[in-house]
Image (spheres, grey):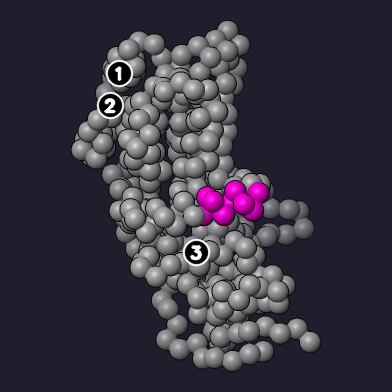
């Protein structure tokens, strides 16, 4: 007989879904199912309370695969969240008992009231770390570590200069703080003067340039002494890629980790051969390729950041899961500072028992 320790009572489960690629506000809908799924061996069922709206979540909706000919498949956005262990399957370690607060990543489908995840991807949340901080403590800190490893590889012992786009974004702020700590020569790009001023106040020792100004490229060149930047950390892409490549020093590297921008740049439009430039893609979704020991070290870093500097995991706004369209609109605002969250109310009384 299979034992499943359970605190679950039957209740409708809300899930944000889509069946085709497109703009999130056009293709996402809210569904209700009769009951949550059940965890299998080595899995836990988590009742999610908070989950972020990351730019990558929206990009995955826009670029989802075309539905198969045999009929639509329901896809659920989101890869990160925080909640309560609701039930556990066999062969799950004892610290993941029902009622335990956990953060989960990567957990595809977190824009739902419940999600089933492998037990080794559920991170117990320490006392003293707020629910909202816990909901943000994995993806962005792990993205920071992933980018920093790629950056060290590209610099090959140089100290920069390094140019980053979207410096006021959640990841951009973490990169700015890391640059201060490690003495990295970082030049920050913002899309408007208001964002540039906020970043300038936050990191007064780092040059900040607004791309809304006609001479922004010349400003970047002046800040790097005319030598060109060694590395570009870019989450914008699109039509801006050609300008960013032009700002690289010969032999430099453009590291792409997002698609916030519009338009496209053909690869053949970049002077890769003549100037020996490198273009490298980086995704936090490949984080599970690291060894268990390496992942444990990365999670320890994320937990320490959540405990000691939760202000770096800023919240822009909170919306109920049913208000996902308003949350998506807010997440796209250029003036936004922090991450938009989708929330679910905690259950008043789950009851206790075993099935």
Residue at far top of view: 274
Q: Earlier in the sequence, mark 1 or mark 2?
A: 2
Q: Look at the numbered disc 2 and give the secondary structure of its residue.
A: loop
Quarter of the rendering containing residue 52: bottom left
Quarter of the rendering containing residue 248: top left
| Image-based side of 300 in relation to 337, left or right | right
> From which residue to which does the magenta span run?
291-299
Q: Earlier in the sequence, mark 2 or mark 3?
A: 3
Instruction: From the image, tell me which residue sits under label 1.
Output: 223
Q: Whole-percent x and y of residue 123? A: 53, 64
**Residue for point 69% across, 53% down:** 67
Q: Is residue 219 visible?
A: yes
Q: Look at the numbered disc 1 and give the secondary structure of its residue.
A: helix
| Image-based side of 97 in relation to 221, left or right | right
User: How busy is the neighbourhood of tag 1: few (under 14 within 10 Å), some, or many (20 plus)?
Assistant: some
Query: Is residue 152 one of those drawn in magenta?
Result: no
Gap between marks 1 and 2 measured at Cα: 7 Å
Q: Whole-percent x and y of residue 41? A: 72, 72
| Image-based side of 307 in relation to 146, left or right | left
Residue 207 tag number: 2
Q: Nearer the viewer, residue 27 or 191?
A: 191
Tags 1 and 3 touching, CB below 8 Å: no
Image quadrant occupied by the C terminus: bottom right
**Residue for point 45% across, 26% down:** 232
Residue 350 tag number: none
Q: Earlier in the sequence, mark 1 or mark 3?
A: 3
Query: Is residue 297 one of those drawn in magenta?
Result: yes
Gap between marks 2 and 3 measured at Cα: 35 Å
Q: Look at the numbered disc 3 and give the secondary structure of its residue.
A: strand
Instruction: From the image, tell me which residue sits under label 3.
Output: 103
Tags 1 and 2 touching, CB below 8 Å: yes
């Amino acid at each position: 007989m299979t034992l499943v320790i359970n605190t679950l009572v039957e209740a409708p489960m809300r899930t944000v879904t889509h069946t085709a690629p497109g703009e999130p506000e056009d293709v996402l809908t809210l569904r209700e199912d009769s009951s949550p799924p059940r965890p299998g061996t080595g899995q836990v069922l988590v009742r999610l309370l908070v989950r972020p709206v990351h730019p990558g979540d929206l990009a995955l909706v826009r670029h989802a695969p075309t539905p198969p000919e045999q009929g639509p498949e329901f896809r659920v956005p989101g890869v990160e969240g925080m909640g309560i262990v609701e039930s556990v399957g066999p062969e799950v370690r004892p610290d993941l008992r029902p009622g335990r607060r956990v953060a989960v990543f990567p957990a595809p489908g977190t824009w739902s009231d419940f999600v089933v995840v492998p037990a080794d991807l559920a991170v117990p949340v320490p006392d003293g770390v707020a629910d909202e901080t816990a909901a943000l403590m994995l993806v962005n800190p792990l993205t920071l570590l992933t980018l920093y490893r790629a950056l060290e590889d590209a610099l090959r012992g140089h100290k920069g200069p390094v140019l980053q786009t979207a410096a006021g974004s959640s990841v951009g702020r973490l990169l700015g703080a890391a640059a201060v700590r490690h003495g990295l020569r970082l030049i920050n790009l913002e899309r408007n003067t208001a964002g540039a001023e906020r970043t300038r106040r936050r990191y007064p020792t780092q040059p900040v340039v607004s791309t809304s100004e006609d001479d922004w490229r010349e400003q970047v060149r002046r800040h790097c002494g005319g030598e060109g930047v060694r590395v570009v950390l870019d989450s914008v892409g699109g039509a801006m890629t050609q300008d960013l490549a032009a700002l690289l020093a010969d032999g430099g590297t453009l590291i792409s980790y997002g698609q916030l921008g519009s338009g496209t740049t053909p690869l053949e439009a970049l002077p890769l051969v003549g100037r020996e430039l490198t273009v490298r893609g980086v995704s936090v979704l490949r984080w599970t390729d690291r060894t268990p020991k390496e992942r444990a070290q990365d999670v320890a870093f994320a937990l320490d950041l959540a405990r000691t500097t939760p202000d770096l995991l800023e919240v822009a706004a909170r919306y109920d899961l049913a208000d996902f369209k308003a949350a998506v609109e807010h997440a796209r605002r250029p003036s936004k500072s922090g991450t938009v969250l989708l929330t679910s109310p905690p259950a008043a009384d789950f009851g206790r028992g075993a099935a």
